[in-house]
Image (cartoon, coloured by chain):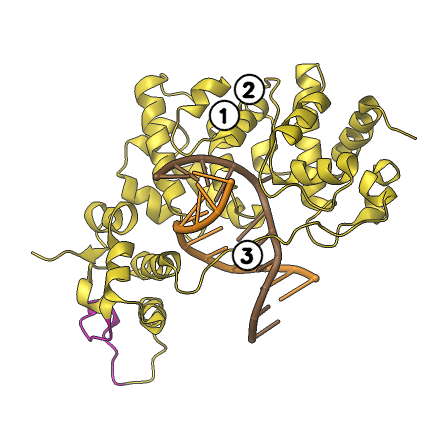
Chain colours: A yellow, B orange, C brown
Amino acid sequence: MEPGPRQLHTEIISWFTANGRDLPWRKAECTPWGIFVSEIMLQQTPVVRVLPVWEQWMERWPDPAALAAEPSGEAVRAWGRLGYPRRALRLHAAATAMTADFNGRVPDTHAELLTLPGVGSYTAAAVASFAFGRRETVVDTNIRRVHARALTGSALPAPALNAAEMRLAVSLLPEDAAASVAWNASVMELGALVCTARSPKCGTCPVVNHCAWVAAGKPPPDYVPRGQAWAGTDRQVRGAVMAVLRHASAPVPRAALLGPVDLLPAAAPEAGSEPAPPEAAALAQLHAINAPVEQLERALAGLLADRLAEETGSGVQLPG
DNA sequence: GAAACGTGGGG
DNA sequence: TCCCCAAGTTT
C-alpha cells in the first residue's frame, strides 16, 4: 500500500526521536557558528573523526571573529588530519567575511550563506535549516540514498544530483518549518545509521514496509560507482607533504622534502635505537612515494604548504 | 559535466 | 590486504 508522505514523516521522525545520535552540534545551546563549523568539517568526513576537532575549535574559536583574528595557517594546523585541508582555509575566509560583512554573525539565509567560501547548495540549506529553523530542502548523500531506495526503488541515487531527485526532495518536505527541520535531520540520520551505502540494516528500518527498493526485491545498482583515484596523484603527494609539515617543529628545508637528507634539525637521528620521531616517519613516507620533482612543486605551491610556512613557525623553508 | 580535492576505519 | 566511501565544493 502506497504510504502517504505524512506517514513517512511520522515514522521516520519518530524513529529519529528515539534513535538519533546525541551530537554536540544538535544540542539546543549550540550556536549557529558551531553548526556552521560542523557542516564544513562533516563534508566528506565521518562524524567520529570530526567530534574531537570540533570540540577543540569551539573552545579556541567560539565565534567567527576569534578565528578571523588569527592567521589562516593556524586554521590549517588546527585542522589536524580531517582531510581536504582547503576546507580549513575556506572556513577561515568565511569567518573573515562574517566579521567584515555580516556583523560577526553567521548569515541566516540560503542566498547569503551561498556567498561564503566553501559553502555550496547543501551546506547553505543545512545551516539555514539546522541553525535558523528555516524551511529548506536539504539534500545530502544520505538523504539521496534514502529517497532512491524508499521512493524510487533504486539501490543507489544517480551518480550526480539531478533535477528529478531535487523535485522529489522538494515534494517530500513538510510545509511546516519546524517539521521540515525535523524531517531533514531525521532522513539524514536514517541514511547514516540504517539505510547505509553498504549492507543496509533493513531489519531495523522504520519504513521497511514502505520501501520501494525492498518491495522490488532489492535490485542491484544499475551502474558501478567510480572509485576515487589516489596512487600517483598530486593529492597523494600533497597529503604526504602536509603530514610532514603538521609534525614539524621547525621549518623544513625544501631539500629534505625532495629526498633523504640529514638536514632535518629536530629529527637528527642519534646513534642509538630511539624510535623515529613522527616527523621523520612522515618524511620517510613522503620519500617512499618517490614523486617527480614537479609534482612536489605543485604540492608545495599555493594554498596549503605556503600557509604553514609563512604564517606559522614550522613549514617549508623557502629559498632565498 | 568530469575531475580534483585528504584521510583513515570498516567490511 | 585491498577497496569502499564519508553531512560536498570548486574548477
Q: Badge 2 is on which residue?
A: A132
A182 relative position to A218: left or right: left
Q: Badge 1 is on which residue?
A: A32
As for residue A269 lying within the magenta part, the answer is yes
Asked if B1 appears above or below C1 in the picture, the reply is: above
Chain on which label 2 sits: A
Asked where in the image residue A204 lies, by quadrant, the reply is top right
Q: Position of residue A196 (x, y in %)?
A: 70, 48
Chain on which label 1 sits: A
Q: Badge 3 is on which residue?
A: A227
Q: Are marks 2 and 3 in contact (CB under 8 Å)?
A: no
Look at label 2 and name its amino acid.
Phe
Q: Earlier in the sequence, mark 2 or mark 1?
A: 1
The secondary structure type at the circle numbered 3 is loop
Q: CA distance from mark 3 to mark 1?
A: 35 Å
**What's the magenta bit mostly, secondary-structure-wise?**
loop
Asked if A220 appears above or below A117 in the picture, the reply is: below
Magenta residues (range):
A259-271
Asked where in the image residue A131 lies, by quadrant, the reply is top right
Q: Are marks 2 and 1 in contact (CB under 8 Å)?
A: yes
> Badge 1: few (under 14), some or many (20 or more) residues near its Cα, within 10 Å?
many
Circle nearer the viewer, 3 or 1: 3
> Badge 2: few (under 14), some or many (20 or more) residues near its Cα, within 10 Å?
some
Q: CA distance from mark 2 to mark 1?
A: 7 Å
Q: CA distance from mark 2 to mark 3?
A: 36 Å
Q: Is residue A69 visible?
A: yes
Chain on which label 3 sits: A
A164 relative position to A9: left or right: left
